Amino acid sequence: MKHKQWMLSICLAVSASAFAQTAAERITVQDPWVRLNAPGAPATGAFMVLRNAASTEIRLVKAESPAAKVTELHDHINEGGVFKMRAIPAVAIKAGGEATLKPGSLHVMLIDLKSPLKEGDTVQITLGFDDGSSKKVEAPVKKVMPEGHGKH
């Protein structure tokens, strides 16, 4: 009888792990895009909305892109009235919630671009999560005017 219980326990554990989803499978990415950098500028930002369907918080812990030599998670901070960007170790995506990566806030920084970007190009970004899983994202390059530009 103990042998049957042991085998049943093993089967249930294997079944449960087969249905467990990785963080990457629980995260959906909406509206990814990369800002067209100014001519000669060696860096730019990538933006998107990350939605978490899991019942626990998931952390985005890294990003990589073949378009840049260095890819980092960044935030903007106000330090004595001066806004600065800084690398951060992770972006928390609350259970059942979302994290918005947008200009002037959280974003993926693409540093030391390997070649100039053009409007309409697509940049591949691989997002890495705290459980070791990853998700590939295709982000179109968009020319975005600063807020208020062109208004009279």
Image: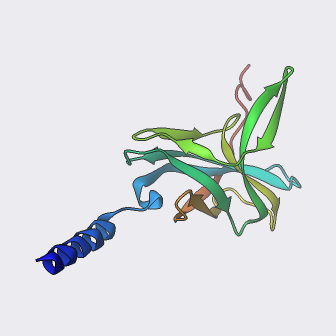
Nearer-the-camera pick, 151 or 73? 73
Query: Of all residues shown, which one is farthest toward the left?
Result: 1
* On screen, residue 49 above or below 140: above
* On screen, residue 70 above or below 86: below
Q: Position of residue 151 (x, y in %)?
A: 71, 23
Residue at 75% across, 35% down: 76
Q: Quadrant of residue 14?
A: bottom left
Nearer-the-camera pick, 80 or 136? 80
Nearer-the-camera pick, 41 or 11? 11
Q: Position of residue 68 (x, y in %)?
A: 77, 64
The N terminus sits in image quarter: bottom left
Q: Position of residue 93 (x, y in %)?
A: 51, 43
Nearer-the-camera pick, 19 or 49? 19
Residue at 41% across, 60% down: 25
Q: Is residue 44 left or right of residue 91?
A: right
Q: Is residue 87 left or right of residue 8?
A: right
The C terminus sits in image quarter: top right
What is the total number of numbered labels drawn onto the structure image? 0
* On screen, residue 87 above or below 135: above
User: Coloring scheme of the render?
Assistant: rainbow
Q: Is residue 53 visible?
A: yes
Q: Is residue 65 left or right of residue 2?
A: right
Residue at 63% across, 54% down: 61
Query: Of all residues shown, which one is farthest toward the front?
Result: 2
Q: Is residue 36 visible?
A: no
Residue at 53% across, 40% down: 99
Q: Position of residue 114 (x, y in %)?
A: 81, 68
